[in-house]
Amino acid sequence: MKIKTLGNLLLILYRLHILSPKGLFYWAKYLLSEGMSLMALLRFAAHFYPNRCAIKDEEDSLTYQETYEKALKLAQLLYTQYQLRPEMNVALLGRNSLILSLLLPALSRIGRQNEAPSYVPRNKDYHSYGRFEW
């Protein structure tokens, strides 16, 4: 039974382009250029699924390609206009929104490439589609 489950997992990962030769090539390429960050993952998703919905809120939705482009522009804006640098600490406080979802990959691009940003939701009673377990 476990072998069948492992086989299904490998098949799913192959279909998602994660374990395909092309997927491994692009994953390595994006990790080398972006570092181990949320931006590398977003760039991978934008390459393979550019027109799929990535983020949706009450007012708007973005595809993976739009999310990657906006996060990239936001990272450039934070770096040039606000002089945000990798050694600086940043605190975010806000409601669940598109802009907050764009800030995490943007900050990971500016920040230390080997450190993932920590994200602690303020309202632990809020469950976004049941994805968080408390």
Image (spheres, grey):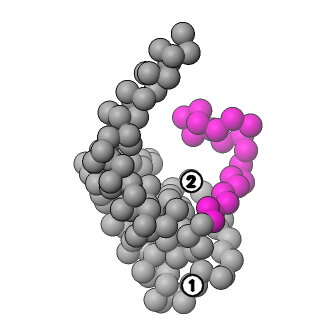
Numbered label attached to residue 84: 1
Camera-nearest residue between 107 and 62: 107
Examine the rendered structure and indicate whether residue 44 appears above or below residue 108: above
- In the picture, residue 8 is in which quadrant? top left
Q: Is residue 41 visible?
A: yes
Residue 72 % position (x, y) = 39, 71
Seen in the image, is 48 located left or right of residue 5?
Answer: left
Amino acid under disc 1: Leu
**Marked residue nearer the N-terminal end (2 or 1):** 1
What is the residue that sits farthest to the top in this orientation?
A: 1
Span colored in magenta = 115-134
Using the image as rendered, state which of residue 51 and residue 96 is in the foreground. 51
* 85 or 59: nearer the viewer: 85
Describe the element under mark 2 as helix, strand or loop. loop
Marks 2 and 1: which is nearer the front?
Answer: 1
Instruction: Check the image and report above or below for 102 versus 130.
Output: below
Residue 96 shows which numbered tag? Answer: 2
25 displayed left or right of 95 = left
Asked if residue 63 can be seen in this view, the reply is: no
Image point 52% across, 76% down: which residue? Answer: 110
